Image (tube, rainbow, N blue to C red):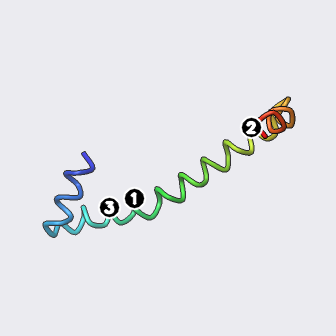
Amino acid sequence: MPHRLIDRAARGDRGSFERVRAVSVITPIAIVGVDLGVRAAFASAPGASRRRTAER
């Protein structure tokens, strides 16, 4: 599906271009937000300090 949207945007479809533009801006921000949320969840989990020590 994304490749069709990108193809339509490349052919000049304004609506497809706007969707691709929005997704390309939002996706990296969402990835960083989820990554930080997961790290925070694991950092506050019971035994987290022992895991970090064992990894080093």
Q: Secondary structure at mark 1?
A: helix
The residue depicted at 24 percent of the width and 45 percent of the height is 1
Locate residue 3 relative to residue 32 in the image: left or right.
Answer: left
**Disc 1 to disc 3: CB gap under 8 Å:** yes
Spatial CA span between label 1 and label 2: 28 Å
The residue depicted at 47 percent of the width and 60 percent of the height is 26
The image position of residue 47, as x and y in percent, is 85, 30
The image position of residue 53, as x and y in percent, is 84, 37
Q: Which residue position holds label 2? A: 42
Farthest residue to the front: give it: 56
Residue 25 vertical placement versus 53 (above, below): below
Circle 2 crowding by C-alpha within 10 Å: few under 14, some 14–19, many from 20? some
Locate residue 23 relative to residue 35 in the image: left or right.
Answer: left
Farthest residue to the top: give it: 46
Circle 1 crowding by C-alpha within 10 Å: few under 14, some 14–19, many from 20? few
Circle 3 crowding by C-alpha within 10 Å: few under 14, some 14–19, many from 20? some
Mark number, residue 20: 3
Which quadrant of the view contains residue 50?
A: top right
Q: Amino acid at mark 1?
A: Val
Q: Earlier in the sequence, mark 2 or mark 3?
A: 3
Spatial CA span between label 1 and label 3: 5 Å
Which tag is nearer the camera, tag 1 or tag 2?
2
The image position of residue 46, as x and y in percent, is 85, 29
Q: Amino acid at mark 3?
A: Val
Q: Secondary structure at mark 2?
A: helix
Which tag is nearer the camera, tag 2 or tag 3?
2
Residue 5 vertical placement versus 47 (above, below): below
Q: Which residue position holds label 1? A: 23
Mark number, residue 49: none
Q: Amino acid at mark 2?
A: Phe
